[in-house]
Amino acid sequence: MVQGNIVVLVLKIVLFVTGSGLIVPASASEGSDASAREASTGASKSYSPYASETFPRSVYWGDTHVHSSWSVDAGNMGNLRVGPDEAFRFARGETLMAHNGQRLRLKRPLDFLLVSDHAAYLGVLPRLDANDALARSTEVGERWYQLRQKGEMLAVFLEFAASFLKGVDVIANEPLERAVWQDVIENAERYNQPGLFTAFIGYEWTSSANGENLHRNVVFRDGPEKTGQLLPFSALDSFDPEDLWRHMNRYEDLTGGRVLAIPHNSNLSAGQMFSVETRDGRPIDRAYAEARSRWEPLVEATQYKGDSETHPLLSPNDEFADYETWDVNIGGRTTPPEELLGGYVRSALERGLDLEARTGANPYKFGLIGSSDSHTGFAAAEEDNFWGKFSEGEASATRWSDPFWPEGSGNEVEYLEWKMAASGYAAIWAKENTREALFDAMARRETYATTGPRMVVRFFGGWSFEAGDETRPDLALAGYSRGVPMGGDLPPAPAAEDSAPTFLVSVLKDPDGANLDRVQIVKGWRTRDGGLVERIFDVAVSDGRKIRRDGRTSKKVGSTVDVENATYRNSIGATTLAAVWRDPDFDPSERAFYYLRAIEIPKPRWTAYDASFFEVQMSTEVPMTTRDRAYSSPIWYTP
């Protein structure tokens, strides 16, 4: 009797919970019936307006260009113990110890990191220092081991640099390469936590023939099961980027994985990064243009070794063009003016329009990111938390006047540490913080660069945005539903004669940083007669200033910087700037691109923080203030 009562009780509970007197396994027909019931009752239309959203609402912050002690140059220039483990830990927000004995930590952790150690001689130095038999098994490996044991790092650096520039692998130890690459993969795997922190697998391909910087960071979408099937491709294999792309193509064919490359420091390329010719002197044709656009959807526009957006000689009407400008190539030779055109992002975007008109494809249709190129292992891009390019340039009273290149390295130009820029970071709009989602966003160019601050930038292009859209609380929904985001292509123009593209712009200041001075749209276009033109428009400005009919404001925002104490106040500028802007010069027959540039109010540069902290007097040529900024990926119009 008791048993029967229990059965009845269980049946009653089931009836109450399920609303059914019968329990059967779920079936396809039952799912179809349920869907039909939802459709008939309107249940498929959820009260939650976000249930069916497909666009990204989150921006993720990171650095795709950090070197650890496993890079042969970093390991010979002071970085003896900050390896990939420490680099990942620092990026995730841990407090670490620098070589100078000081503790350091990021103000806010990053969301993702690529430890992009140089593929050439990758991981050799730490293994030599650990007395690894495999690393010492070659003649050069043994010599480098003995030199490092005696502290003769410069001798090792000079041997490495000489072989590097000649493209000769003086170690040639494939078993060592395989062992180290597996270590690189395992390092990233330990720190990759989908949804919380993304540790990309990758490396840097470092072509520097004749001192021309053609470097690329190689980033994989995949995990160890695919990335472990092929060794990294280094400049010792080839100086030609087309050979790198062929290697990347082999990787995808072999594994079914995905990979992309990100050029950096075009400003140090002697005009070769964005040339109109291939490396062997052939005019760029459609096949080359399509291959480059396929494998290199992004460019690193700003970093420690200067800013690559534009140059004051290339953009003489741009009062913000002279930002952290470097006028040398990677070997230290001063860049003559005639070589500048192929070395900067804005002129490359213009050149891409012309090449597309001539060949049918645009090799320079790329999005923008920033990253640091730190060789200390520390992804630090904040003005008040800058730890130098190399570990020898960590915070000290004398680093500002220390030479960037080691004494005796033979460079023509002595570059001093104060010329380093505390820049930058990569911002990615993605649905979630995973390798796959971040990679896919990079591939579609939905990214932007900042020189350090974490401004939130939205930039959409379309044909129907109207004044007032910028004040909508669902601005992103309007942007995606009626236009394309940064990195996209405008759809064909409407038939109306007065049609012109409209752009929806919104920038929110870094909550822990400086206010905004202004937001601009930079337009470049190819005229009907083949000319290349650029123009800058102020589209939103702070403090009640007016924008003239020519699209510019004449009044400066001012400055609150106290250089002596390395402080400033947010009593000027704006916390957010937004606008809808319509192109007044639009010609539907002309190819064009548009990108957003947001500029902060002045604040102390890292050199001012050094001068205040260490109580040192620097020479008058050293800048003490800066105007940090963000650059969105462009939006293109094609007739």
Image: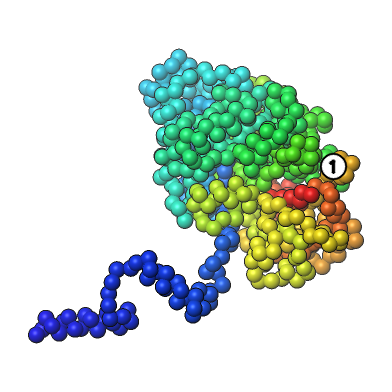
**Residue 575, quarter of the rendered image:** bottom right
Front residue of 526/4: it is 4
Q: Residue at x 28, y 81 (%)?
A: 21
Name the element at disc 1. strand
| Res. 572 visible in picture | no
Count of picture labels: 1
Q: Residue at x 56, y 55 (%)?
A: 430
The picture places residue 48, in percent across and down from the top left corner, at: 53, 74
Q: Residue at x 37, y 65 (%)?
A: 28
Give the residue type at disc 1: Leu
Front residue of 155/112: it is 112
Q: Which residue in the structure is indicated by mark 1?
A: 532
Front residue of 620/508: it is 508
| Res. 474 visible in picture | yes
Residue at the top extreme? 139
**Residue 132, quarter of the rendered image:** top left
